[in-house]
């Protein structure tokens, strides 16, 4: 950005607050860089967990890794909104600087800042609308949010390089201008903290009662666990209740297995505590009982390095199937669950049978299973 005195000298006449200054802007910039850096790293983890390239095998532990990174991504992203608004308020007099462009370098810098601001606003607004289930935009959210992240981080890195010496100068030195920035910065930090506190309950149950801004809350829904996609919405209300339901395990010819619900219940049952961690930021720990996936796969003669696909009764939609790689299917915690919190699975939680595995995005915890395919 531009050296200030002339610009702000002019601006000060029109913009009376002395908080439109370099030092306030620098501090907010430092906070924003940390916030966007965190969102970028946790966002990449989230993206590559949901869409792993062929060479990537995520570990199945720590059990809560995805829960924590995705919670940080969404709750941290929401807490960034007050920071960004404060930063934009602090620097907006520069929008009106005259002449608008003084040199080629200056034009490039302004273009870059425009890209940074537009990209950052785009990320926060689309993220917010997405977790509020308001798909007001005409493009697929995940694709747009993912690619815009690179644009924002690229622009941010160049911006940091441009501003580095100024930020060091303004942030490190004690100010001697008598402007009270503390009150303003404290208010902005408090607004961010308030947003975080009133959403963190969507993943951290001690704060559940404070979670007034969270679209999903722990403790709500059948068996105290929220539902994403009901059986009705997935179009499986009838098929999931059909008494003739079977789970097939197929792969090696001649070793195809098929189980009724009673047969699955007759196999060794295991009870584990595992979270559902939705990509939208909410998560809920729960107690699941069912058959270990690895037990079924061993019965079907699966090779040690086999990739496995679980398929549901659902006929359409992106989440009707998911891949389970060896680290996950070999993990004794990975279950085909029949019970949730001590009672048979509710229809909306995936009855008669659903996948539940450690360190895995909610979208891949496929419900209403009817087939396990060894690839
Ligand atoms: N077949 C199927 N399974 C699915 C989905 C779906 O739409 N279809 N949604 C997924 C998503 S996005 C989440 S967060 C979890 C939610 O599980 P729950 O409704 O039991 O909490 O289920 C997953 N399993
Ligand atoms: Mo989800």
Image (spheres, rainbow, N blue to C red):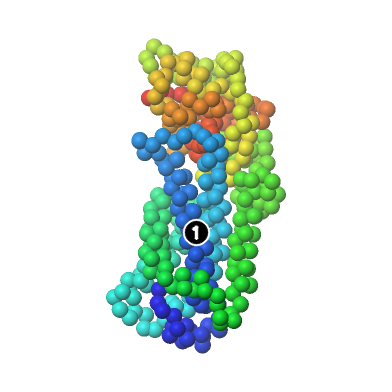
Q: Position of residue 54 (x, y in %)?
A: 35, 35
- What residue lies at 54% left-to-right and 60% top-to-bottom? 80
- What residue lies at 47% left-to-right and 34% top-to-bottom? 59
The vertical placement of 92 against 51, above or below, is below
Q: Position of residue 31 (x, y in %)?
A: 52, 63
Residue most toward the left? 104
Q: Residues within 10 Å of mark 1 (few under 14, many from 20)?
A: few
The vertical placement of 211 against 25, above or below, is above
Pick the front one: 152 or 310: 152
Side of 323 relative to 275 (left or right) = left
Residue most toward the top? 254
- The quarter holding residue 113 reads bottom left
Residue most toward the front? 173
Can see residue 107? yes
Pick the front one: 24 or 320: 24
The vertical placement of 162 against 228, above or below, is below
- The quadrant in which the C terminus is found is top left
- The quadrant in which the N terminus is found is bottom left
Residue identified by numbered label 1: 34
Pick the front one: 105 or 84: 105
Q: Secondary structure at mark 1?
A: helix
């Amino acid at each position: 950005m531009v050296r200030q005195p002339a610009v702000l000298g002019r601006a000060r006449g029109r913009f009376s607050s002395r908080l439109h200054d370099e030092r306030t802007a620098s501090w907010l910039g430092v906070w924003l860089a940390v916030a966007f850096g965190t969102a970028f790293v946790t966002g990449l983890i989230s993206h590559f967990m949901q869409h792993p390239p062929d060479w990537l095998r995520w570990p199945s532990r720590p059990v809560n890794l995805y829960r924590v990174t995705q919670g940080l991504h969404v709750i941290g992203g929401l807490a960034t909104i007050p920071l960004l608004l404060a930063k934009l308020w602090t620097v907006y007099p520069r929008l009106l600087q005259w002449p608008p462009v003084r040199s080629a370098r200056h034009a490039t810098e302004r273009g870059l800042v425009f890209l940074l601001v537009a990209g950052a606003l785009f990320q926060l607004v689309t993220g917010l609308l997405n977790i509020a289930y308001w798909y007001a935009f005409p493009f697929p959210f995940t694709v747009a949010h993912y690619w815009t992240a690179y644009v924002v981080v690229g622009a941010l890195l160049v911006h940091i390089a441009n501003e580095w010496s100024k930020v060091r100068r303004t942030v490190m030195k004690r100010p001697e201008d008598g402007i009270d920035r503390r009150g303003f910065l404290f208010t902005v930090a408090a607004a961010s903290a308030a947003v975080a506190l009133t959403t963190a309950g969507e993943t951290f149950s001690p704060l559940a009662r404070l979670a007034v801004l969270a679209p999903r809350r722990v403790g709500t829904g059948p068996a105290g666990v929220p539902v994403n996609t009901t059986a009705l919405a997935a179009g499986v209300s009838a098929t999931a209740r059909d008494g003739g339901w079977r789970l097939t395990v197929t792969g090696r010819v001649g070793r195809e297995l098929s189980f009724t619900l009673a047969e699955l219940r007759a196999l060794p049952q295991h009870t584990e505590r595992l979270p559902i961690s939705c990509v939208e930021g909410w998560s809920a720990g729960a107690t699941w009982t069912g058959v270990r996936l690895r037990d079924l796969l061993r019965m079907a003669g699966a090779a040690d390095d086999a990739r496995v696909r679980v398929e549901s009764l659902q006929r359409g939609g992106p989440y009707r199937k998911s891949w389970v790689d060896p680290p996950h299917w070999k993990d004794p915690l990975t279950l085909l669950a029949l019970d949730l919190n001590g009672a048979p699975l509710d229809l909306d939680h995936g009855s008669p049978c659903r996948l539940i595995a450690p360190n895995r995005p909610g979208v891949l915890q496929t419900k209403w299973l009817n087939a396990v395919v060894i690839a």
